[in-house]
Image (cartoon, rainbow, N blue to C red):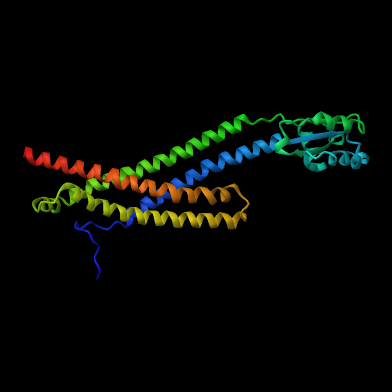
Amino acid sequence: MKQRRFDIPFGSDVWISIVLGLMLFVTSISLIVSVGVNQYIQDWNTSAQATFTIELPHKSDILMPEVMQVLKQYPEVESVSVLDKSYVQKLMFQLGVASIDAPILIDFIVSKDVLLNFDSDKILNALQKIIPQTSIIKPVLTSQEALSMAQVVGYIAFGFGVIMVVAMCAIIAFLMYSEVQTHERTIDLFNLLGAPNYFISKIFQNYVFLILVKAFLLSLALNVCLYYASYIVYMGDTYLARGITWITWAYIVLGIPVLMVSVIQLIVPVTVLSCLKNKYNNSLHA
């Protein structure tokens, strides 16, 4: 049977790898939430600002073809939709207006690239030549509160991800401290044989490297399952699915290797060498 190439008899690391893998997965979820919420709110805000509503008197159904013809003459208008009469009546009832007097409401969406320079008054003037009582409800929703809320949610999600990463690093540091104490006699034997402390630290680095590789593979598998699950449920037409498409792979390709290198090259040696130094000083005092 092929043995693992460790000079120190470490114990099983399966549960440690599972815990760290789940923490990496939760970190990726927090990044997805951060990016997805911000993107969704900003797109919704832009869409709301690009939607105008035409209000016609309730007895102007006969002139609707002419109204639609006017709207089609303007290239800035992307789409036009007449709101359902029952919906408008319900809306008016909630506002205290008799349903029999409910107006006809038409929504039209202006192209986003011309929204800043769009002048709705020219459409209003053209429509008033057909129906003098026509009015246009301009978008008053700037949704600054929604954008601020999205930023707060993004900060919270990102902060939670950072906390998970810090917690993972703390687990690694605590694990190294425990392993040094557990294998104290073996380390003493290495010292008697003349092995320097950096050689012992290298052994611990190899041990942590295998743990993080297993954790990374678990996180990768969970991310891929989440991506395909969301794609199947929403048929790809969702901010979550689109967000996972690139943020997950960016996180895996860029974030995980950087995190693994920093843990292996910084946290492990600092923790192990610090423990060995304290152990050496204690032995001198003894």
Quarter holding the N terminus is bottom left
Quarter holding the C terminus is top left
Residue 125: x and y in percent read 87, 29
Q: Residue furthest left?
A: 286
**Quadrant of the rendered image containing residue 107:** top right
62, above or below 5, in the image: above
User: Is 120 positioned to the left or the right of 257 in the image?
Assistant: right
37, above or below 223, in the image: above
- Tag count: 0
Who's the residue at 40% across and 49% down the image?
Answer: 256
Who's the residue at 36% across and 41% down the image?
Answer: 166
Residue 203: x and y in percent read 22, 53
Who's the residue at 16% across and 41% down the image?
Answer: 277
Who's the residue at 79% across and 31% down the image?
Answer: 120
Give the camera-side residue of 190 and 33. Answer: 190
Residue 44: x and y in percent read 65, 39
Give the camera-side residue of 57 and 77. Answer: 77
237, above or below 98, in the image: below
User: Is 245 positioned to the left or the right of 90 in the image?
Assistant: left
Give the camera-side residue of 81 and 264. Answer: 264
User: Is 35 positioned to the left or the right of 207 in the image?
Assistant: right
User: Is 56 positioned to the left or the right of 273 in the image?
Assistant: right
Give the camera-side residue of 110 and 61. Answer: 110
Residue 231: x and y in percent read 58, 55
